[in-house]
Image (cartoon, rainbow, N blue to C red):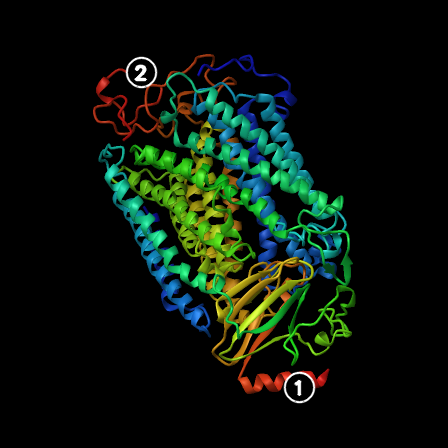
Amino acid sequence: MLLAPVVWVLTVVICYFFVVKTWWFPPPINQHGLAYDEQFMRTLIITGIIFFVAQFALGYAIFKFRDDGRRASYYHGNDKLETLWTSATALLFLGLVLMGSKIWANVHFDEAPPDSIPIEVLGKQFAWSFRYPGPDGKFGRTDLKLVNDSAGNPFGLDDKDPAAKDDLVSASLKIPVGKPIKLIMHSRDVIHNFFVRELRMKQDIVPGMEIPLHFQADKIGVYEVPCSELCGLGHFQMRTTMTVLSEADFEKWKQQQQALK
Amino acid sequence: MSAPVAHTAHAPEGFIRKYVFSLDHKVIGIQYYFLGLFSVFIGMSLSLLMRFHMVNPEAKVAWFAKLWPTGAAGGMMTPELYLSLMTMHGTIMVFFVLTTVPQSGFGNYFLPIQIGAEDMAFPVLNMMSFWTTFIALVVMVSAFFVQGGAPLSGWTAYPPLSGAGRVTGPGEGLGQTLWIVSIAIFCGASLMGAINFIATTVDLRCKGMRLMRMPLTCWTWLVTAILGLLGFAVLLAAGVLLILDREAGTSFFLPSGMMISDHILTNHKGGSPLLWQHLFWFFGHPEVYIAILPGMGVTSHVLSTFSRKPIFGYKAMVYAILSIGFLGFLVWGHHMFMSGMNPYSALAFSVLTMCIGVPSAIKTFNWIGTLWGGKIHFDTAMMFALGFVSLFVTGGISGIFLGQPALDLYFHDTYFVVGHFHMIMGVAAIFGMFAGTFYWFPKMFGKMMNEPLGKLHFYCTFIGVYAIFTPMHYLGIAGNPRRYSDFSNVEYLSPLMPVHHFMTYAAYFTAAAQILFVVNLFWSMAKGPKAPMNPWNSTSLEWSIPSPPPFDNFAGVHPVVNHGPYEFSVPGAPRDYIMQNDPLTAPAVTETDAS
């Protein structure tokens, strides 16, 4: 009996925090993020209604049908109702998936635009490295045997290759605003995961695989990149940032890096 | 359908044959139950240590240093110790609690009785499966005490972290090997159990116990056994391959070109880390249903009994259980949306995942339909069954977010996932176990449990688990990654710390409330009032025999079943329930078609 109000209060409290959004997404910084938030809200409203109605019905049944001396009704079900709610849920659930599939397709089925800026991402226990092709626009040769983290060569760039000599390596990601970016992701040891909340995107980085991810960021700022796949004892420390710069600042940054080499 | 005589009707006399290496399914069921109870307290203690560490990462506690001289040298828990607690918490809870108690514990005890059999089909296999499980638990726990400590790769043990050996971290040496060996042994035990359950259900039903007259508990035990047979076989194979990668230099899961902490691995070539994930989740997803299906069965059974009303849509429930079992094998890819597998397959897996939501929704509707128009008795067993429905709805709903690859782009590996699976696979399943305990305790131990204490325990636990696991969803929305031992390195996590503190206090509270249960359990076993044969006026066969049942269950009489399992409040019947083996006297009130 007391259970009915307990269920109701819990339901209201849970819904309250979803409505007031005390703990919430940061604002998105790309078109994909806007579409993502729409799909999230759509799902939240539909599931929120189901949640609220189901919990309230449960509480109501507990309250209303407590033993008050009546005899319970005797029936074994209702095929019509059964068919009705089965098809209703099937339609709702499948409808949601289909509505969201375009968002997934934009991220994973579409190729990166041809003018995308390629950046290679390297994950290793427990740090990130990013490589930009130099002025020649080409990623140079690398060799595991040349890897030397302390000397600033996590990729193992081979200096004998002129295409490698001008490659830039950075411990944080810098990108220009409003330009398509294509990440080419590698891991050297275990599985890591590249995640930027504001992009609403996440991708595992798997050793032995080359996984692409393309996006565009439309807002200048600094965004955190926490590793999001368990990678060992320093997993919680494997963090870097993604800085979105104006195009001019991005070029300037590249020149500075080039000069520092 | 006749029951072959598996053993004589006389119980063995010696203590060892009677209570240790017993062939009696009832003793084995209780052994499994206590193995699970022991494990759940280990698992819960680990989670309390984790919750403590997450909010006090730099605290120095003297007895930590005593327990873990290297992992917590000076009393401060290291990140690797945190991760090994996490790995062992997940593993112990999933395998030795959620898989063990609802199926092997209650199932062993009550499947034979509910279908009118004297024992399981293969009593020796049954004993072996328990003792094999016991060995698996010993091997698992021993991983804490070897050099490097317990593994830190999580209960999912993704290679290369779990496959490349000591170089990937402390605990990835002998600790990880013991983990895999233990899981392989556990798989063997589960396979033996699964075969036994299937054979028993197919072969040993008494006269009149047609499939569509079985209590829903028996249906869930049967389907769970089928899931176990197919799932654990694959996990066993995967475990063997992982051991070979680690110890024999094969490359099933390890690719070439790996370099771990400045050390180039030259002996591996051509393996795929994703292969492990496919094999693991091919088992891992059905495992979720292995954990929850028996809880659904108990909940259905208890809801009908304490509402004094037939289950709403018995046939629909059976079909829902069967389709959950079938679809359960087609959705493993939804754990891998972010893994780098072909993105086109994500859409297929997501459609199938939404399909499996449908039978789950049917069950929820039918549970509420069962209550509707009933005459509800609020005994503690019923409270937990009602709590199960509430938690099942809450935990199931968040699956609609995670089942969409588009939304998983953000939620994967955040606390949203942790909240989701703890709600549904963790606490909902545990509420099923509590419901089963309060419902069947009188039969198992011949004593009644204390109701007021039971209700107090229920309310504390119900509110407590909501307080622990609901905030995880908000944390997930704020982007809080899981499996972090310390949140101070990511700036956006610091405003979330008050939520973590709240969850930690809620966990302390909920854990403390479990003392009420333990006291109730053991006190009632010793001092509880004597239980009558059928304290809840239930219909299934276990309530037609004394509490506790005699050694051969039905004292040599073969029961004959004449009625469906949920004949409550039948108009014109003398009592408000007709037991399954009641004689067919008044034709008007007998076999009512379940449709």
Q: Is residue B524 visible?
A: no
To which residue does mark 1 refer?
A256
Query: Alpha-carbon neighbours of circle 1 within 10 Å: few (<14), some, or many (≥20)?
Result: few
The front one of B492 and B572 is B492
Query: Circle 2 is placed at which residue position?
Result: B583
Q: Is residue B356 above or below residue B72?
A: above
For residue B575, side relative to residue B114 (left or right): left
Dot in front, 1 or 2:
1
- Label placed on residue B224: none
Q: Residue B380 falls in which quadrant of the image?
A: top left
When the figure is inspected, residue B35 is found, relative to residue B423, above or below; the finding is: above
| Location of the C terminus of chain A (image quadrant) | bottom right
Left or right: residue A65 versus residue B181 is left
What residue is rendered at 35% in x and 22% in y? B580
Q: Nearer the viewer, residue B408 or B581?
A: B408
**Mark 1 vs mark 2, CA separation in Å:** 92 Å
Question: Can you give x and y, in whole percent of width and height, for residue B379 in the image?
Answer: 37, 38
Residue closest to the eye, B217 or A186: A186
Q: Residue at x 66, y 86 (%)?
A: A256
Q: Chain of mark 2?
A: B
Say which element carries label 2.
loop
Q: Amino acid at mark 1?
A: Gln
- Could you tell me the amino acid type at mark 2? Pro
Question: Which residue is painted at 57% across and 21% down in the image?
Answer: B123
What secondary structure is found at the residue carrying circle 1?
A: helix
